[in-house]
Image (spheres, grey):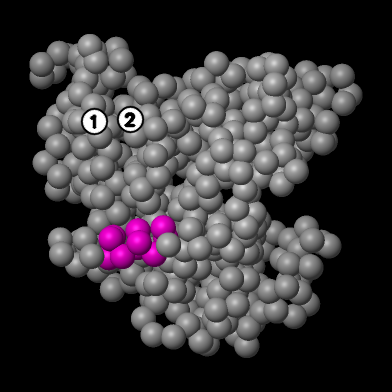
Amino acid sequence: MTLRDYADHNNNPGQGNGALPAVWRTPFMSITVPSTTPATTSLLSPGRQALDSALFQLDQAADRLGLDDGLRTMLATPRRSLTVAVPVRREDGRMDVVQGFRVQHNITRGPAKGGIRFHPSTDIHEVTALAMWMTWKCALVGIPYGGAKGGVAVDPASLTTRELERVTRRYVNEILPIIGPERDIPAPDVGTDEQTMAWIMDTYSVNAGYSVPGVVTGKPMTLGGSLGRAGSTSRGVQIAALKALPGSPEGRTVAVQGFGKVGAPAARYLADAGCRVVAVSDVTGAVVNTSGLDVDDLRAWVAETGGVYGYRRADALTHAELLELDVDILVPAALEGVINEENASRVRARLVVEGANGPTTPEADRILADAGVTVVPDILANAGGVIVSYLEWVQNLQAHSWSAAEVDMKLRDLMEQSYDAVAETAASQGVTLRQAAHLIGVGRVAEAHRLRGLYP
C-alpha cells in the first residue's frame, strides 16, 4: 500500500477496511499522493504543494526500499505537531493574534532539529513538509538528529523591533514544553536571524533559571554561536555545486534566484571559486549583466536600498526570465515550488543546485531529468546549515569552541562525503540524485526504527 492509498482511504473512510485510527488523521492526509507523478497542484496552497512533494518523494523511496505499510505510515506521520496562538501587542496598543507552529517529524535518531521561519504564508502543511525534509537531511549527512520545523504566520517586515521581540518570546513560551538542548533545537530560517535566536535562548534560559546556550543554534558569537555558522548553508551550496559541476568552475555562468540570506553568500562563494554570477533576483525584482555582476557592490546596493531593483550596473528582467536564462548553474535559494510543471521545460541551466527547501516540484523533477538537467537536491545541497548547527551544538555541550578553519574543514568533509555517497547510489541504482539522497536518508531512518523496535 502506498501513501496515496492511505490518503485516499482517509478521504473515503467508509470504503475498504474502515477508517484510519485517529492518530493517523494528520493534516496532510487530505492530500492525495500519487504513486507515479502528482496531479496538477496549481490549486493547492504553497504549503500543501510542498507537503504533496515531500510525501511523493517518501513514497518513491519507500517503494524502492520495500518498506512495509506500518513503517511507511510511521515515517509519513509527524511525531508531534503543535499549533499555538501568538498574541501580538502592537505599539499603538492594538492586539493581533497570529498562528505559530512547531512540528517534530521524527526523533528516532536523536533530538529534533530545524529552523523557525517568520513568513505570512507559513502554515502547518509547509512546516510539516520542511520537518520531514529535515529528517532525511540529517540522516543523509550522518548527524544524530531528527527533523523538526517551526513557523509563525507573520510578516516580520511589518513589525517594529519591539513587536518582533514580543512575538518571538511569546511563541517560544508557547512551544517551551517541547524544545530543549536534548529535545528539539531551533535555528534561524526565512525571516529570522541570530537576534531571533538570542531572544529564544534568553526566554528559555529565564524559564530554566540558568543559561542554556545549547537550546538554539545560529546564535551570536558572544552567546555561544559558532564561527562559520552564518554562511554555512551557502558554503554547502558552493561545495555541492563544485562537486556536481563537470570540469573547472572558471568562467561558468550562474543565476541565483533569491539574493538573500542563502543566495547572496552563495553567489559570493561561487564567484570566489571562479564562476561568473550573471543574474540574481529577490522580492523587489531581478537584474542581469552577462559580463558578470560585482557581487560585493550589489550586496552594498541591497543594504542601502533594500533590494536588487534598480541596480545601476545591470539590466532589469522578470523573475520568470531569470529562471529560464541560459546559464551553467541555477541556484533557487528562496521558497518552495518556484520550478514547476509550467516552467520546467524552459529551464536552460545544465545544473540546478537547490539552496532553498523544496524549490522543485516532482512534476518539474521529471521534466528536468528527461531534459538531461542535473538537480542537486535540497536535502543535500543546503545541508551545510544543519551541519554547522550540529557543530555549534556540540561546542555548546562541551563548553568548547573550534576555529573557523576547523569548522570549515568539518563542513567540507561531511558535504563531500555525503555528495559522493549520493552520486554513487544514483549511478548504481540508475536514479536521480534526489532519489538517491532520499534512498539513503529514508533508509537510515527506517533502519533506526527497526533497530530500536516499537514500545510497548
> Element at badge 1?
helix
As rendered, which of 126 and 261 lies closer to the eye? 261
Quarter of the image for residue 208 reads top right
Mark 1, other Cα within 10 Å: few <14 / some 14–19 / many ≥20? some
Report the span colored magenta.
414-423
Residue highlighted by disc 1: 449
Q: Rate crowding at label 2 as few (under 14), some (14 to 19) or many (20 or more) other CA atoms within 10 Å.
A: many
Question: Which residue is located at x 83 percent, y 62 percent?
Answer: 304
Q: Residue flagged by tag 1: what amino acid is it? A: His
Q: Position of residue 6 (x, y in %)?
A: 21, 27
The residue drawn where x is 79% and y is 61% is 303
Image quadrant where residue 264 sits: bottom right
- Is 418 covered by the magenta stretch? yes
Q: What element carries label 2?
A: loop
Q: 287 or 251: nearer the eye?
A: 251
- Residue 108, numbered label: 2
Q: Tell me whether the residue at label 1 lies in contact with that at label 2, contact meaning CB atoms closer than 8 angstroms.
A: yes
Amino acid on which disc 2 is placed: Thr
Place of residue 406 in the rendered image (x, y in percent of width and height, measured from the top left): 55, 60
